[in-house]
Image: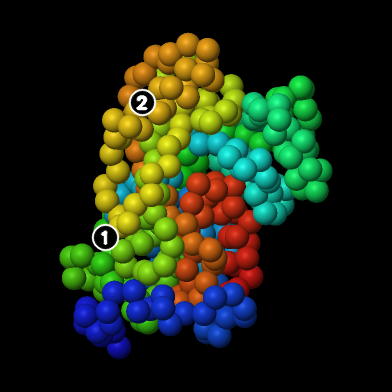
Amino acid sequence: MASRPGAWPAGKAAATGSEGGAGTQAWPAPARARPGGYDFVVVGAGIAGAVAARLLFEAGYRVRVVARGAGASHAPAAIVNPVRAKRGKPVPEAAEALEAATRLYRRFVPLAYGLVHLVEEAAVPRWQVGLLESGLPHRWEKNALFLPTAFWLRPRRLLAGLLSGITRERARVVFLEREGIWLEDGRFLPGPVIWAGGAEGAGVLPGGSLTAGSLLRVAEPGDGRIQGVFHAGGVIGGTYRPLERYAEPTLTAGELSELRERAARLLGRPPTVLGAWSGVRFRRPEPLAELPGGLLFSGFGSTGFLLAPLWGRRLLARL
């Protein structure tokens, strides 16, 4: 039987979970655990929650998605970039992750292939070393790195496709316990729970870091170039501003100045700004971990669109 809110201090569920390894939970079999109900509650409708819900749904599980709002995954455009622009190093498991993302996403949204990193000439040798070991298709044209299989997409259309046919409920989760989740309106939903709450859910579970960021919507369409910022789909971004705790994101004067300056350097002239968008990213060292009564599937930071499908396969393998 579920206990009342307040039985556990907020976050205790995560603190008692185990990182990695084989799960010890008794997971439901597909479409058998609860006649007329659902097998899993997925908290969060960003890219992690949407990918988890879609993979569970297609594996035969009955899924209910609970989320309060849009979150950082609902940016106007997103790049699926396997190479870290600041470090010049491929993301771990970059080739495998890009393949998994491509296979899943192309079923729901057009993918605009081809990203180009403009690299300082002195840094080219360092970038080349990491790329040779990554298995990523690429080619160099002087100091321009072309990644033909990387791409950008429209996140909102993708998320709508991933969540199509799946039961969804707009509500705020305020408490997680072993038997399920409590909603702000006092209702209790029994688990098992897949916690993919992202930055908004970081206040319920401990651990991880929060980073605010902003994008500019511009008149110039963009072709997937990256140099300090990316430019694709009429969007230029983004910024990184560490936060101590979650707060509703807003574009600061400093971020606006930074984006304008970097955009002018990339375009060769000042951009025509039409608007702005802001969000908060959540990152953990391990995005998949066991919780009492469910699994944590969150904390991808700015690499969520790249890594979520690969880790989603691992989530299914844990069940």
For label 1, the residue is: 172
Q: Quadrant of residue 277?
A: top left
For label 2, the residue is: 257
Residue 234 is situated, as x and y percent measured from the top left of the image, at 46, 22
Local packing at callout 1 (Cα closer than 10 Å; few below 14, some 14-19, many 20+) is some
Q: CA distance from mark 2 to mark 1?
A: 34 Å
Q: Locate residue 235 relative to residue 29 in the image: left or right.
A: left
Kindly identify the residue that appears in the image at 70 percent across and 54 percent down. Answer: 93
Q: Nearer the viewer, residue 66 or 150?
A: 150
- For the C terminus, the image quarter is bottom right
Query: In the image, which is nearer the foreground, mark 2 or mark 1?
Result: 2
Q: Is residue 244 above or below residue 150?
A: below
| Residue 162 seen in the current view | no
Q: Earlier in the sequence, mark 2 or mark 1?
A: 1
Kindly identify the residue that appears in the image at 52 percent across and 80 percent down. Answer: 18
Q: Locate residue 244 relative to residue 108 in the image: left or right.
A: left
